[in-house]
Every structure is written in structure tokens, then in C-alpha cells.
Image (cartoon, rainbow, N blue to C red):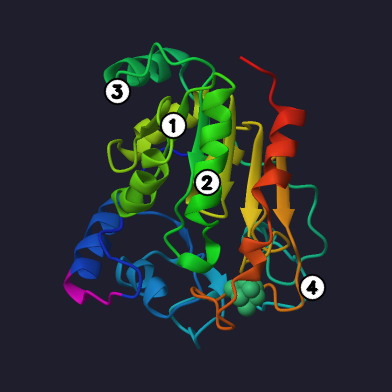
Amino acid sequence: MPEVRGVLDNPLRHGEFGLLERLRLARRMRVAAYDMAIVLPNSWKSALVPWLAGIPVRVGYTGEARHGLINRRHRLERGAGSTIAERYARLADAPGEAALPDLPQPRLAAEPAQCAATAARLGLDGDAAPVALCPGAEYGPAKRWPEEYWARIAGCLAARGHAVWLIGSANDTGIAQAIAAAVPRGCRNLCGRTTLAQAIDLLAIARFVLTNDSGLMHVAAALDRPMIALFGSSSPRYTPPLSKNAEVLWLELACSPCFKRECPLGHFRCMREIQPERVEARLAARLPPP
Ligand code: SF4
């Protein structure tokens, strides 16, 4: 993102308190002498580091009673920005400011030479018209389309002459192995074999992306790839892929969105009833043959 000048990695896992790590991170931030911190999460501990770093203006939603830690506080008003991106964008204005202008969509810039080098390094440079499948979702199984459906789509794409790349983290390896095992030729399991930067390069050169609602979905949207995003227990009204090239398949059942990690009703109809035939038809309509 050309707008981002530097990145400090947060070493803490979701939910971890890690006071010592937070103090270390605050020390690094203090050296940079930032004028303002915008704290996106609502948790108390997420506001702690900018306060410890002595950043004078700390902006965020009041969240978990963060009076003092956040000193430019916004109130979350229902309906005042339905997507999470709009809620975050509001933090750039003064609290209580009127309507948001049209927001630009986030964009990641990919370097073609670097993408080609990444493909070559992973032995993918001879692959024809690759389609990226992202079958994982860290959040939990309620956001994952069933393995056997992925396998069917992977088989179809391979039969049409596309190289199929399964992209995800090491945590998705098992799911990806099961999918690749069901497709005799043309399907590569790259889960856990790439860095995040390499995964971004591969998504940037994929002809098409099929994905669950996951971090990689947002990456593919920011790369503006033609894509289909499958939503189950979450809502595309809240965290949609921000790209005009993205098509969302979501059944909007009465129980959906439940935002649960596992189906509380046990039937998982929100994902099971997005039949692979429907996805196949949309792919056939949108993805030219190689
Ligand atoms: S309760 Fe409904 S939305 Fe939630 S996981 Fe089950 S089927 Fe999906």
C-alpha cells in the first residue's frame, strides 16, 4: 500500500495480554514520536500500547470503558456506518462529524516482476491460467465451505485446463491436502508453503479467486482480482470484499449471520446449501477458458 510508510509487527496473538511484549512495542513506538494513534479494535488492551508510548492524541471508539487511554473518543452509533471499513474511516474525522464521503476502496499494488519471481521460485511459472482457491478461514469452521465442494470445483477447473493453486496458511494444510488428494492432476497445495508476501504475489497473478470470507478474501479484493466470495456465518453487509470485481454468494438464512465459529444449530446449512453447481455456473459465466 503506497500510503503506508512503515510497519511495526504486533507480536501478540489474538486475546493474549503479554504485558512485557506490549511494553517493548510501546518503547519502539515512543522512539518514532508519533503525534496521533488511531486504535481500531475496541478492546482495552489494544489502547494500552499507544498510551504507554506517550502518543499525545489517541483516537478510537470508547469501547471497553477506555476513558483516559483513548482521549479523542467516538461513540459507535447504530447505523452510522454499517460496514467495518466505514466505522474505521469515521475515526479519521472529528467525533460527531456528519456523513462520510464516498470512501476509496483499499488497493494493494503488486509488482509484476516480483510476482513472476515468486511464481518461478515456487516452481509455478509454467502453470496455465491459474485459479486461486482459498479454502481456509482462521475464524473457524462456520466460515469454511465444505472440503468436498472445494474438491469438486478444483476438479472442474483442472479439467477445463486451469492450474489450481490452493493458498492459505499452515493451519489450512490439512483441508488443502484433502482437496488436492481428490484431484488427480493440476491442483497444487501451497498452503503453508508461502510467506504472506508470496501469497499476495500469487493472488495478484491468479486469473480468478474463489474464497471463503477470510483475510485472503480482503487481500484478493484489494488486488482487485475477479473473485467469488462465499459467506456463511458472517455477513457481507459488515465485512464485504471491497472491490467491484467481487461477487458474493450468501444465502441469508434466517439464522444468518450468527457470527459463530461453529454452527450452533449443527446443520451448517448456510454453507452446505451453497451448492457447488451454483459456484460452477458462476465460474463458467465469469472465467474465460484458458
Ligand atoms: S446457525 Fe445458521 S448462520 Fe450460523 S453457522 Fe449455523 S447455519 Fe450458519
**Label 1, on which residue?**
165
Residue type, numbered disc 4: Gly
Residue type, numbered disc 3: Leu
Judge the density around disc 2: few (<14), some (14-19), many (≥20) Cα neighbours within 10 Å: many
Magenta residues, start to end: 16-20
At mark 1, the secondary structure is: strand
* 4 or 3: tag closer to the N-terminus: 4
State the residue at coordinates (74%, 78%): 77
* 3 or 1: tag closer to the N-terminus: 3
State the residue at coordinates (30%, 35%): 194
Mark 4 or 1, closer to the camera: 1
> Does the CB distance between marks 3 and 1 fall below 8 Å?
no
Where residue 206 appears, x then y in whole percent?
A: 53, 25
At mark 4, the secondary structure is: loop
Between 189 and 199, the one lying in front of the other is 189
Q: CA distance from mark 3 to mark 1?
A: 11 Å
Residue 122 seen: yes
Judge the density around disc 4: few (<14), some (14-19), many (≥20) Cα neighbours within 10 Å: few
Where residue 69 appears, x then y in whole percent?
A: 43, 79
**Label 2, on which residue?**
150
**Label 4, on which residue?**
79
* 4 or 1: tag closer to the N-terminus: 4
